[in-house]
Image: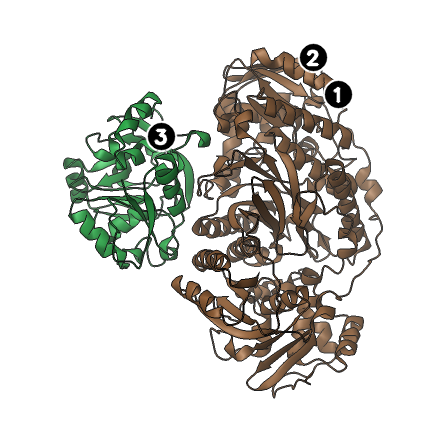
Chain colours: A brown, B green
């Protein structure tokens, strides 16, 4: 152990300076005790990054333990750069979702772009080739004068995601986009990526073997993004605009060559461990790799490639410059990796070596600038059990408000279709390449995206879901619903869920009401995960999404991946993209409604978007009913009975039928035995399926055997949406509805 | 036919083209590195889509100066087949193997959507599986696909019959609304005077398998490698 020196010009570290770095008095005291002295300036920077909420999960760790993380398919659960599950036929899938909320609000284009870059690196760092992205986005109000800034954010985020993913050549195949005033001061940008590789091709971010070299690869280190992780762990205030320099700048071209070079290097047989430099840059990659390997590290910061020579050790360790990786190779074989990198036009530099000291020792210009124990800083970061209590206004929120029965349900439908929330999202999707890599069977705009897995008879299905209004009204039910809806979306294409990732977006956990929301949402999600036997294999927590005390709605975004074992089975009724994608396509098919409804309006689109009310209890999620419905859907898919399927979600039955009709402009004639209000109920565990006439009996018998209510309600055909209900009928031209639906978003974003 | 797919830093449709040539059309296919100087005996050279060199400066401009391009040029000038798809088309324009240039799309946004193309020539090997007037559906995915040239050069291009594919509506009509990127004369793909060099913005390799719901592009790649036996099968399938 060496006692590091402070250099001339470096600030003297005291508790006030530590507080500026976001460390509490207690945390600073603990740090001094751990080191046996006061930290240097560089050490303070390192510790503050590792102790930040973003890196340490200190406020959420205690709750995250509630998630089930194991199954027979799980290869790597939480704790790696991405979780890994077995998807059969000798293949595994690595996936994760991560937030880039704070930077995207400050600088939408770069914030969103680097969010995609970061999540792609998390996946290919595992040795998996990325094959798909999803993006879950939440914006505030975009209408009128007040929405001007929000429209700028929508435009920037969409361009940022598109320009990055398109250039790297990874298709963006789905996601969701929502609008709600609770995001006026904090937008959410959650990026998901999935990669695949052979089961023996997985790498972990582990530094092991004393004396093995540590290689730095990719872009040079600059001043961008310094303290990004800390910024992402704070609420916004009037000063936040000044934090623009903490937003990183992305270069997707470098990412693409880094991806190819890294995968090639990993296949070369000399790489032992890999880690990208994401949040907290070189600090987290070096400390986390060493901690996983139970090792230490010595880094000579003079060898780190810099954009400008004047960077200090503090800045070098905390820079979040993008498109950088760390490799640990076998001793004496670093040349092999350097050669591969240089063939792809990338710089590589040996910056240090693995040690068995359990400490990280950093030197710069001949002096030791940091000497810290690794494991206690990484795994021993503080864990808080923050006080949690229901928000004071919870009763007020949950007060049941009677919804007016719509006088003209067709008009209500048209009004819903004309909102940016429920309008067609093609304006966004067509800015993303969704077909590159030529695997996309079903792309954006359906319940679940479907990608074939080349060389196997199977396919992967992906979806991301959450209803923030439900979560705000009753977090536990909202958490359950997010998982249930995702599992249901996968079931619509016949896919068995194999693993889940999530992004938990909340306000400040120091507010007991928010801490309660976090705990309750997680509990609800965990209940559903157990019920559906879906392990959580990776995830991310984004707290402090609030501005001047106004928090976002609790938004635990869920992404679940499913497997369709044999595509051949599900395509009996026609082309796979028709059968598996959303939308009527064959006149004459019977329409069958599955599931039953008790009339659920709390937090519904009808209540929120047409009546400006957000109150009551969200729809009850009966996990057994959901499981029965999903089992029936998967069975029907395997048997090849279905020509189409769409789950009932936001907006209810009438909206779901309209969506199916609008995709290809093919209508239906149907009748249901409920009143007009129930057409907008958001009762869960429901779906509409289409079946050829000769198949209805099989389906109805299977439904009865599975305990799922099933009713034939009508037939596909014509160019009108005709639905008889108790006491009236909806009868509208599909083309007209489609026009309203398609124009909603382009008009709103101007 | 031995097929070479050139890999530039930033190419991202190289594997997709390889997949169709090798696994669907069962041709001998190989990747050619951009710094190489030999085409290794390939009869068909494909410049694939992607963002070579990040599209920095202009799409395709840096790739046009890669060492391999000298060999591609010699191959083209000797009558060998060269196919440029999307970014590969942009490279062919930058090298001058095809005339004209690309601007940003009309609405200045990336465009990822299925378009309809009308086949304007069926006397070329590329189009041997199509008939003149056929309407094909293919995906496009680009930010710079707005084809432009001088009026005189466009007239010359038309007169020589070098326009091979045009953006049309589903019924095969030239409509401004169907020309989404704003290309002059709705041009989606052109060939050189000899007909052996073809560039197009849409991606035939992404619509060459039934599983993906669209085989309209298979005919073009099958024509490129002149797999005679498949012509009938494709026509029967409505290719």
Q: Is residue A211 above or below residue A219?
A: below
Q: Which mark is residue A40?
A: none
Q: CA distance from mark 3 to mark 1?
A: 44 Å
- Label 2 crowd (10 A; few <14 / some 14-19 / many >=20): few
Kindly state the secondary structure of the residue where label 1 is placed.
loop
Numbered circle sitting on residue A727:
2
Q: Which residue is found at the position 74% from the left and 23% from the top?
A: A597
- Seen at 72% across and 69% down, the residue is A375
Apparent side of residue A582 relative to residue B134 in the rendered image (left or right): right
Check the image and name the residue furthest to the bottom: A8
Q: CA distance from mark 3 to mark 2?
A: 49 Å
Placement of A701 over or under B55, stated as above or below: above
Tell me, yes or no, whether dots 3 and 1 are on the same chain: no
Q: Chain ID for label 1?
A: A
Dots 2, 1 in contact, CB < 8 A: no
**Figure quadrant of residue A314:** bottom right
Q: Quadrant of the N terminus of chain A?
A: bottom right
The residue to which callout 3 is attached is B216
Q: Residues within 10 Å of mark 1 (few under 14, many from 20)?
A: some
Chain at tag 2: A
In the rendering, at what x and y percent does residue B10 appear? 39, 54
Q: Could you say where residue A522 lies in the image, as x and y percent from the top left?
A: 76, 46
Q: Secondary structure at mark 3?
A: loop
Q: Does the image show residue A474?
A: no
Q: Are marks 3 and 1 in contact (CB under 8 Å)?
A: no
Q: Chain of mark 3?
A: B
What label sits on residue A707 in the rendered view?
Answer: 1
């Amino acid at each position: 152990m060496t006692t590091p020196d402070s250099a001339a010009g470096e600030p003297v570290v005291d508790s006030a300076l530590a507080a500026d770095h976001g460390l509490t008095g207690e945390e600073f005291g603990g740090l001094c005790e751990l080191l046996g002295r006061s930290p240097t300036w560089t050490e303070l920077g390192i510790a503050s990054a590792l102790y930040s909420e973003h890196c340490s999960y200190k406020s959420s760790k205690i709750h995250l333990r509630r998630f089930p993380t194991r199954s027979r398919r799980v290869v790597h659960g939480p704790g790696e750069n991405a979780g890994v599950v077995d998807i059969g036929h000798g293949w595994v899938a690595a996936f994760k979702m991560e937030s880039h909320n704070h930077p995207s609000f400050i600088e939408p284009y770069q914030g969103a772009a680097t969010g995609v870059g970061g999540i792609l690196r998390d996946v290919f760092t595992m040795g998996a080739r990325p094959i798909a992205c999803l993006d879950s986005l939440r914006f505030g109000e975009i209408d009128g004068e007040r929405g001007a800034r929000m429209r700028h954010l929508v435009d920037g985020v969409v361009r940022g995601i598109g320009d990055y993913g398109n250039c790297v050549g990874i298709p963006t195949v789905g996601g969701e986009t929502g609008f709600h005033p609770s995001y006026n001061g904090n937008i959410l940008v959650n990026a998901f990526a999935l990669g695949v590789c052979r089961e023996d091709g997985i790498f972990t971010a582990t530094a092991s073997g004393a004396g093995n070299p540590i290689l730095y690869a990719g872009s040079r280190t600059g001043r961008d993004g310094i303290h990004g992780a800390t910024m992402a762990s704070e609420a916004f205030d009037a000063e936040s605009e000044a934090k623009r320099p903490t937003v990183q700048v992305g270069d997707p071209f470098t990412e693409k060559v880094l991806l190819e070079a890294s995968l090639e290097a990993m296949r070369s047989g000399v790489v032992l461990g890999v880690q990208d430099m994401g949040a907290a840059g070189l600090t987290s990659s070096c400390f986390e790799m060493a901690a996983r390997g139970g090792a230490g590290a010595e880094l000579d910061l003079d060898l780190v490639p810099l954009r400008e020579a004047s960077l200090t050790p503090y800045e070098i360790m905390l820079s979040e410059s993008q498109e950088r990786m760390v490799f640990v190779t076998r001793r004496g074989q670093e040349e092999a990796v350097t050669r591969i990198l240089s063939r792809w036009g990338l710089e590589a530099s040996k910056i240090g070596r693995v040690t068995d000291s359990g400490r990280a020792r950093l030197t710069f210009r001949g002096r030791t600038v940091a000497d810290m124990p690794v494991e206690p800083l990484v795994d021993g970061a503080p864990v808080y059990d923050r006080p949690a209590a229901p928000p004071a206004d919870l009763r007020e929120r949950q007060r049941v408000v009677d919804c007016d029965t719509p006088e003209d349900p067709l008009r209500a439908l048209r009004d819903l279709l004309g909102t940016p929330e429920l309008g067609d999202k093609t304006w966004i999707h067509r800015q993303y390449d969704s077909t590159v890599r030529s695997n996309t069977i079903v792309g954006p705009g359906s319940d679940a995206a479907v990608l074939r897995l080349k060389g196997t008879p199977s396919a992967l299905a992906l979806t991301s879901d959450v209803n923030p209004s439900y979560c705000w009204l009753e977090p536990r039910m909202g958490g359950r619903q997010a998982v249930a809806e995702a599992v249901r979306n996968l079931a619509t294409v016949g896919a068995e869920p194999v693993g889940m990732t999530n992004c938990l977006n909340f306000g400040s956990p120091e507010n007991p009401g928010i801490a309660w929301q976090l705990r309750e949402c997680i509990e609800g999600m965990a209940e559903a995960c157990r019920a559906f036997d879906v392990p959580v294999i990776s995830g991310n927590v984004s707290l402090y999404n609030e501005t001047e005390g106004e928090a976002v709605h609790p938004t635990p975004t869920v992404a679940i991946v499913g497997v369709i074992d044999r595509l051949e089975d599900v395509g009996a009724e026609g082309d796979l993209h028709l059968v598996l994608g959303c939308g009527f396509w064959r006149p004459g098919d019977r329409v069958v409604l599955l599931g039953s409804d008790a009339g659920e309006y709390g937090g519904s689109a009808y209540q929120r978007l047409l009546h400006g009310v957000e109150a009551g209890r969200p729809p009850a999620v009966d996990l057994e009913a959901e499981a029965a419905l999903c089992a029936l859907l998967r069975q029907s898919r395997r048997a090849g009975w279905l020509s189409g399927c769409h789950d009932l979600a936001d907006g209810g039955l009438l909206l779901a039928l309209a969506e199916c009709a609008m995709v290809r402009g093919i209508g239906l004639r149907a009748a249901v035995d409920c009143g007009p209000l129930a057409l907008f109920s958001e009762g869960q565990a429901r779906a509409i399926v289409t079946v050829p006439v000769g198949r209805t009996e099989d389906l109805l018998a299977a439904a009865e055997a599975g305990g799922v209510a099933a009713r034939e309600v009508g037939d596909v055909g014509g160019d009108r949406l005709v639905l008889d209900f108790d006491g009236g009928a909806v009868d509208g031209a599909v083309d007209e509805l489609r026009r309203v639906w398609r124009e909603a978003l382009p008009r709103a974003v101007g | 036919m031995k097929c070479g797919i050139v890999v530039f830093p930033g190419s991202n449709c190289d594997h997709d083209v390889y997949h169709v040539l090798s696994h669907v059309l069962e041709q001998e296919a190989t990747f050619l590195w951009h710094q190489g100087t030999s085409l290794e005996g390939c009869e068909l050279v494909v410049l694939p889509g992607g963002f070579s060199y990040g599209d920095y400066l202009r799409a395709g401009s840096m790739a046009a100066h890669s060492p391999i391009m000298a060999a591609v040029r010699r191959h083209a000038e000797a009558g060998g087949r060269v196919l440029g798809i999307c970014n590969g088309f942009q490279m062919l324009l930058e090298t001058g193997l095809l005339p004209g240039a690309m601007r940003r799309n009309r609405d200045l946004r990336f465009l990822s959507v299925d378009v309809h193309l009308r086949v304007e020539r069926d006397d070329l090997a590329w189009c041997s599986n199509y008939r003149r007037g056929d309407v094909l559906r293919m995906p496009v995915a680009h930010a710079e696909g707005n084809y432009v040239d001088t009026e005189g050069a466009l007239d010359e291009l038309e007169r020589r019959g070098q326009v091979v594919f045009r953006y049309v509506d589903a019924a095969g009509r030239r409509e401004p609304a169907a020309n989404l990127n704003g290309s002059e004369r709705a041009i989606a793909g052109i060939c050189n005077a000899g007909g052996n060099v073809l560039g197009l913005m849409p991606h035939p390799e992404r619509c060459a398998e039934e599983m993906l719901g669209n085989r309209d592009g298979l005919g073009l790649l099958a024509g490129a490698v002149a797999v005679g036996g498949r012509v009938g099968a494709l026509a029967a399938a409505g290719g």
